[in-house]
Image: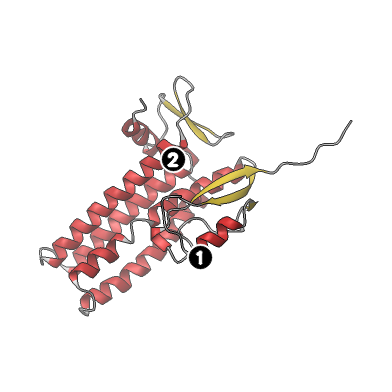
Amino acid sequence: MTNISAFSAAVLATRLDAAWSYDRNLGRYRDDKGKFLSQQSVDSLIDARVDKLNATLRRITRMLIRNDITLDQWQGSVRQALKEAHIQAGVIGNGGRDNMGPRENGQIGQRLRREYSFLQKFAKDLLEKRVSAPMALARVSMYTRTVRGAYLEGYQSKKQEQGYSLMRRILDPQAAHCEDCLLYARRGIVPIGSVPLPGERCACRSNCKCSVKFFRQQYPAIGV
């Protein structure tokens, strides 16, 4: 059985260790025996990171509600938790820290700046007593799903580097989908960038359950 904790630690370290490597041609992780890590395992790792962030943000928010911490302390703690989660998800999507350069770090930074802007508005609403305790807990949980976008953005970038030029939005059969996601899925296989990544430009927003699959362009063959 794959040791996900060991894999996660290796990916997030300065360099991947001897037990794990990243195949840049295939865009997949493999262990020291050459066995590939399944995409399901990677997805489960990201989901676990999202769940951990959600628990952290709700705990910090409850502390604020009880007046155990100040609003400034709450905002600083939420920012730090978001930063750590987004960086970790982005690193995993990009194939480990070895594959992180100015462009990859810039993508994560841009996402975080957007989240910090939303957080500032959230803090203002809390200061002005426009948000009840239940509303605050529900609202802070919305920040957790954006972490998946950080992973997907890195994953998509690496797929493009590996020669993938097409994508397709996949609907989760167990989820209720907004009209935006249904429209994106109905478009079928399209060039990368033709439809947004899950959670972006859709009414579902952070609650989006869609996934994405990438394809290489198939060129017609001629007889020789």
N-terminal of the pair, mark 1 or mark 2, is 2
Position of residue 192 measured from the top left corner of the image (x, y, whole percent): 61, 53
**Neighbour tally class for label 2: few under 14, some 14-19, many 20 plus, Cα within 10 Å:** many
- Pointer 2 residue: 97
Question: Which label sits on residue 205?
Answer: none
> For the N terminus, which image quadrant?
top left
Position of residue 20 measured from the top left corner of the image (x, y, whole percent): 43, 28
Q: Is residue 64 visible?
A: yes
Q: Is residue 37 above or below residue 199?
A: above
Q: Name the element at disc 1.
A: helix
Which residue sits furthest right? 224
Q: Is residue 195 above or below residue 122?
A: above
Q: How is the image coloured?
A: secondary structure
Q: Of 142 and 207, which appears nearest the observer?
A: 207
**Neighbour tally class for label 1: few under 14, some 14-19, many 20 plus, Cα within 10 Å:** few
Q: CA distance from mark 1 to mark 2?
A: 37 Å
Image side of residue 142 versus residue 164, left or right: left
Q: In the rendered structure, which amino acid carries the disc numbered 2?
A: Arg
Residue 223 position by quadrant: top right
- Pointer 1 residue: 179
Q: Name the element at disc 2.
A: helix
Q: In the rendered structure, which amino acid carries the disc numbered 1?
A: Glu
> For the C terminus, which image quadrant?
top right
